[in-house]
Each structure stands twice: as structure tokens, then as C-alpha cells.
Image (cartoon, helix red, strand yellow):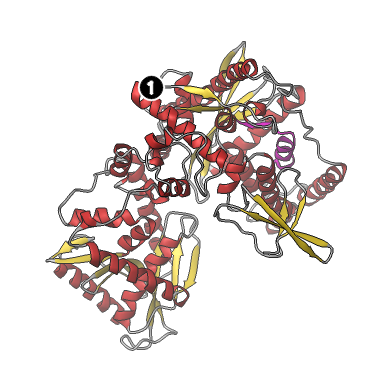
Amino acid sequence: MQFLDGRLVTSATDLVGYLACDHLATLELGRVAGLWERPDRRDDPTIALIQEKGDLHESAYLDRLRLEGRSVVEIAKDGLTTVEALTDAAAATLDAMRRGADVIYQATFFDGRWRGHADFLFKRSDRASPVLGSWSYDIADTKLARAVKTGAVLQLCVYAGLLEAVQGIAPEWLAVVTGDGEEHRYRAEDFAAYFRYVRARFEARITRDADDPMGADTYPDPVDHCRVCAWSPTCIQRRRDDDHLSIVAGMRRIDTERLAEAGVSTLTALAGLSGDVSIPGVLAPQLDRLRQQARLQLHERITGERVFELIEPSTADARRGFGLLPQPSPWDVFFDIEADPWATETGLEYLLGVVVEDAGSPRYIPIWGTSAEAEKAAFERFIDVVIARLAEHPDLHVYHYGGYEAGAIKRLMQRHGTRAAEVDALLRGEVLVDLLNVVRQGIRASVESYSLKQIEKFYLAAREGPVTEAGFSVVEFERWLKERDPAILQEIADYNRDDCVSTWSLRGWLEARRSEAIERWPMEDWSRPTPTSGDPSNGVREWDAKVAERVRDLTIGSHPDEKDEEAAARVLLANLLEWHRREEKSQYWRWFELKDRMTVEQLVVERDALGGLVFLDEQPAMGKRSVRRYTFEPQDHPFKPGAKAVDQATGRDAGEVVG
């Protein structure tokens, strides 16, 4: 958004930003009016890395087009800071279109109010236009993400509208080239109506508040866009200064809205809320959790004292909180991964860090996988080490913090098509233990976030060193890819070691808290999780044996050498034998995660579950079936009439949705 020669000029970025966050439009209007300045985050190495990777992706795609023999005309994009410069660039774009260039790179459009810079225009010789003659142009943009986001398509819609005005006909196709090199095509007309609607909303919003941005009734509520927004530091400070509810750890946007509607609009007010007060639309357990969390955060703010307290265990569900902790074993493994989402087309889990106990002290083992081939070998080595150790010590567990490590193990198994049976054994045997679930359900602490870096402040000294945050480890690994300096890898390993040691220390700290809880709340059921066999059923075992035999028959003496087509085909066919089972595993993993790992409050948030149902009544039977009615707070869910439902408590069929 800019004021150029006395007029407000908007862009596709402004429209997409407005849809992501209404307050962003207020901030940008205030900036162009000279009321405040946008924070300068150009020195943020993570943002700089994303920009660099995006430029490289765009450049690689441009090189690909040139190698295909297409004629490319590039429109200069620098220095477009006046209406005259924009008008000249738009004229140069139209001239290239009239001359029939195959590809126009950095095409510029300007209609006096909207400016647009499409990465690529592609000539369509099979589709005439009133202005150009026997050809017209479609649009494509490159995006570093590996999945197409709504904002990317809407951005192309802005360009499509500007292009239509220039060539006299709307483009037929909009294409997004994602970071993995895949081209995703969409029909422009499928989005035209929605685009016109949101553009009209945006135009009305800008027109209404352009002269008085400070009068706009918006607030910087946290949204997904905050992760990449230059204004994020300003908004975070505003929320803290306002004592906003969003700074309460675990607070959801819908809870913030419900509490504010009930007159509870600050952390301080929530902390002082009586325990017998109910808030419409907020489940009682969720409200109590948020109230207690706010109380602790307020305590630290007032006294400067960092505190935590134990959560009373549930007598109805022993598999929560400290009930998730298995019996410690001297053979336990503590695990943390360093990953780079941009190192390859699919990303790279480049360091699998492991800590094991040696004479009661942590011993760190780095397993490196700094290329796609090395990643596979590192994954296989890690799984083989754990399986071999488990065979000798069936009581061991692999501890991690948060869902990333467990998810990465599953992804690596599917990505490389290897160690599927072993990963299944680890999952069936419940060998992986996520300590974040223990922390969230077992204690509450005076922190804004339950990240490992925040929780470890209760049991470790402050970290030191050049790499202390995950984002910086990615930046450093990218630097290593360019410089190949071993010292960089050592710094990353030191950071990863600290995470692994922190996880090891956390398990010990939680064990001490468990002992305190047992002393405070004597119960009959303070048992540990029951060990579960990771062995497959007889049917699965027989199937695996048949598949292994067929794979051996197909691949004896074969290597996937591109010069030996028959050998390569045999290896490909062998890999396909288990493809469907590998694809189905993610559905089963998700099913068990919802059934066994989540609380009611967590199910409310999950897209493929309904949580917090309250029984209303039972309707007269429809044929042989009775119909039970429930109410629940508004939440996203996939259920429609005819859908089958599963009761989380039993894992059994709960009936069919009829309405």
C-alpha cells in the first residue's frame, strides 16, 4: 500500500493481508498516512533466508522455461516508486504481449489504483483476444510453499482482473508453481465471483478508513499470518500492554471472543474470575484451565517469581498427565530432530539427535543425514539402533517433546519406503512418549508458551552459544550447505545436544513431580502405562513374509541403475508392493491419536473430531434405531448426515449421524 503522486495505490499483497488480518489494513493505512512506521525486520536471518529461497525457486523455474526454448521478455521491476514509473512498466508489459513473447517475466499491471506484478505470463496461441489478436495470456506465480494456499490463488485473481482489462479477455488458467516444482492449475472463472466479493469488501474498508486509520475498530488478534508479518513485534507488544486474553497460554480465538462477550476482556480479569462462574460457549474444564493459567501468569508478572503447580489427576482417566509416564529404564532413549524445510524438494531431516544414559549421565549421539540419500541411511540407522536396543531391553522408551519427532518418523518411513514393520512395532508398542502431553496435563506454569525452551527454565540454566533457537539452526545449516565449514555443523550439533539433554532432564524433573503428586493425592490407581507388545498379528506377519519373499525375487541382483531399465523396473515394482499399506497407515495413526492421545479440550480444536458433546434427549425410535440429540460449542468438523461416528471412550461405533 502506497501514496504515489497523491493517490492511494493498493496491491494483491494488501488484499491477501487484509483477509488474513483486518488489523493489518489499519496498520498499513496508518503507515502510508505517516502516523507510524513499519518495523524493519530485514536483519532477521530467517526472513532473509525465506526471501532468498523464494528468489532461487523463481529463478530456477525461469531457467527451466528458457531451457525449453521459450522466448522470455523480462520487465524491470526495480524503481517503481512513482505513478509514471508504474505506467511505463505496464506499457512495456503490454508491448511485450503485443509482440507475442512466449513468456513475460515480472509482468507489471497498473490501472491507477491497483498495481500487480505477476511472476509469469504464458502465451496461449489457441485462445484469441480482442486486443492482441490470435493469442492471449494466462498467469503463473512461484511460491516456496509445497501446498497451494488460498492467498496465492487470490493474488493471482488480482493479476487476472488487471490482465483482463489489458488483453480484453480473462485468462483461462491460473497456475501456482510450488516449492517442489509442481505446477497447480486452476480455472480463473471458478474463483471470479468470490474474488469480486472480497475485493469489494476490501475497497469499502479502505475507502472508509483511509482518512482516519486510528478510527478503525480493529485489534491485533493473533492469527497465522503473524508468523510472517513485519508488524508482528508491534502487535505482540500491544497485546501485552493491553493485558489481552490472547497472551494466556493455550487460549483460542473463540475462547477470547466468548470471554470478551461475557465482560472478561483481560488476563487480570480472567485470573480473578470466581470458580463458580460459567461462560456461555466455553466448556467448564476449559474455562477452569484458562483461569488457573491466567492466575499463574499474573503472579509472575506481579512478583517476578516463575512458578508452577501440579494438576490434580483425574480418577476417571489414569492415562493423563503423570499417568502417561512409563517406568524409567536406564536404556531409555531421548530424541530430537533438526530439519530444513527448504534443503530439498521435500525438505530434509538432516540431524537425528539421540541421548542415552551412560553411568547415570547423558551421552549424545548425532546421526547426520545431510543429503536425501544420507537422510535415508540416518533414519535406518536410528530405527535399527532403537529396535536392537528394544530387543535386549523391552522396557525402554523413546522420549521426545512435541509431535514433530513422531510425525517425522512416520514421514521418513513413507518418504523412503523403508523400515515400515519396525516403525509399526514402535507405534503398536507405544514406545514413543511425548513429554509435552505429560507437561500440559500434569502441571501448569507461569509461562506464555509451553515450548521446551520455556519449560526448561524450571530445571536448567539459561542456554548459551551461537545457535539457541530452531529457526537459527535452519539458517546455519543453509550456511553450511554453501560453505561446508565443519564448525557450523558442530554448532548445530551442540544446539541439538542441548535439546536432547533438556528432554532427558525434563523426564527426571517430571518423575520428581509425579512423586509429589502421589504424596499429595493418594489414589489406588497410580500405576504406570501397561507395556504393550509391538508384535504384529499372525495375519500381518504372514503377509509381511510373503511381501518380503516377493521383493527378494524381484530384486535379486538388481540395482535401480537408469541404464538397466529392466532392473530399475523390478525395483520400482518391488517398492509398489507395500505402497497402499504405507498410504493407509497415516489414517490409522490419526485414528489412534484421536482415540488415545487427546483430551476433550483438544478434540474441540481438531478438525476431524467433535468434542464436548452434551446430551439433550432421546427422540422416538426411527425403525429399530433410537435417535439421541446432543449440543456442542461451535467448532469445525467433517460430520454430515450418514457419517459414522466413533466414541472416543470405547473406540467403538457410536452410531450414524442423522442430522
533 relative position to 57: left or right? right
User: Which corner quadrant holds the C terminus?
Assistant: bottom right
Residue 370 shows in this picture? no
Residue 38 shows in this picture? yes
627 relative position to 458: left or right? right
Q: Position of residue 334 (x, y in %)?
A: 59, 26
| Residue for point 42% across, 37% down | 270
On the image, which quarter does residue 504 sit in? top right
Q: Position of residue 293 (x, y in %)?
A: 47, 32
Within 10 Å of disc 1 (Cα), the crowding (few <14, some 14-19, many 20+) is few
User: Which corner quadrant holds the N terminus?
Assistant: bottom left
| Residue for point 67% across, 17% down | 330
Q: Is residue 166 magenta?
A: no
User: In the rendered image, which residue does mark 1 sit on?
Assistant: 464
Element carrying mark 1: loop
Compared with residue 474, is residue 567 higher up or lower down, i.e. above or below?
below
| Residue for point 56% across, 17% down | 362
Residue that lies at the very extreme toward the front in this rendered image: 276
| Residue for point 66% across, 49% down | 586
Q: Position of residue 315 (x, y in %)?
A: 69, 29
Compared with residue 211, is residue 136 higher up or lower down, i.e. above or below?
below
Residue that lies at the very extreme toward the top in this rendered image: 359
Q: Position of residue 247 (x, y in %)?
A: 39, 38
583 relative position to 350: left or right? right
On the image, which quarter does residue 160 sit in? bottom left
Callout 1, which amino acid?
Glu
- Which residues are drawn in magenta? 418-434
